[in-house]
Image (tube, rainbow, N blue to C red):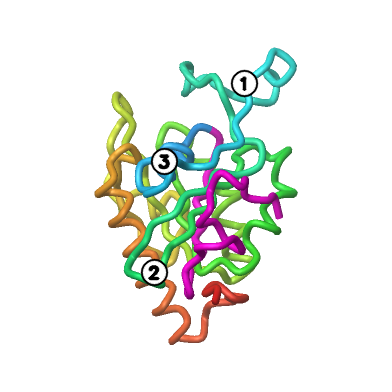
Amino acid sequence: MASVHSDHPSAPGLPGAPAVALKILVAGGFGAGKTTLVGAVSEIRPLRTEERLSELGRPVDDTSAVAGKRTTTVAMDFGRIDIRPGLAVYLFGTPGQDRFWFVWDELARGALGAVVLADTRRLADCFPSVDFFEQRGIPFLVAVNCFEGAEVFEAEDVRAALDLPERVPVLLCDARRREDGKELLARLVEHAMEAVRAGTAGIAGGIAH
């Protein structure tokens, strides 16, 4: 797994780490708002591994719906929220483009669950994330990031378009709003715990000690 820079003294495996930590992934297509969400909810300065988009990447990085996007995540984003003393949530944002998907298996190891961000202007871009977590039995929810100027759809319309079962939560959000992000994480933890109790989750160490 990509290492966490030493500027973050409370990162996993470093001094100051909590006794118990929940690992949650933030996934989705290119430009869906993953870095924004991690930055909005993190209580520490987020670790970001962003690089500027280049002319060489233009043929494979579709920026038609995100014309203002100038950078892309190439390894991961990392953030942290302290729930109470000794209990924290670690957030790992995954890279969106398929050429970086080799990173996903390492990031997913030990994850309690995942938030899959969806952009209704490019809804098909979140299919790979949905498939990834379904195949590995990792509990996830879909968060529809309501971009300004984009058509707004009801959550159930998005569920039908993605062919998601009723057990998978679908929520509307603004990834820039801290309160929206906190609500997503709380709902995901509830969903993951329900999946564990039901025996439908394939979690491998999602709670770190």
Q: Residue at x 69, y 50 (%)?
A: 2
Between disc 3 and disc 1, whose residue precedes?
3
- Residue situated furthest top in the rendering: 55
Q: Position of residue 121 (x, y in %)?
A: 42, 31
Secondary structure of the magenta portion, mostly? loop
Which residue is more in the foreground, 15 or 153?
A: 15
* Disc 3 to disc 2, C-alpha distance: 19 Å
Q: Which label belongs to residue 189? A: 2
Q: Is residue 202 above or below residue 138?
A: below
Question: Left or right: 99 with respect to 43?
Answer: right
44 and 31: which is toward the camera: 44
Above or below 132: residue 47: above
- SS class, disc 2: helix
Could you tell me how far apart the alpha carbons at marks 1 and 2 are, in whole angstroms?
33 Å
Q: Position of residue 12 (x, y in %)?
A: 57, 61
Q: Badge 1: few (under 14), some or many (20 or more) residues near its Cα, within 10 Å? A: few
Residue 49 on image: x %, y %: 61, 36
The magenta region covers 1-30
Question: Residue drawn 33% across and 28% down?
Answer: 150
Say what amino acid the circle numbered 3 marks.
Gly
Q: Which residue is mark 1?
A: 52
Q: Which quarter of the image is occupied by the C terminus?
A: bottom right
Q: CA distance from mark 3 to mark 1?
A: 18 Å
User: In the rendered image, which residue does mark 3 sit on?
Assistant: 39
Q: Residue at x 49, y 51 (%)?
A: 26
**Residue 162, x across and y down, in percent:** 47, 52
Query: Looking at the picture, which amino acid does disc 2 mark?
Result: Val
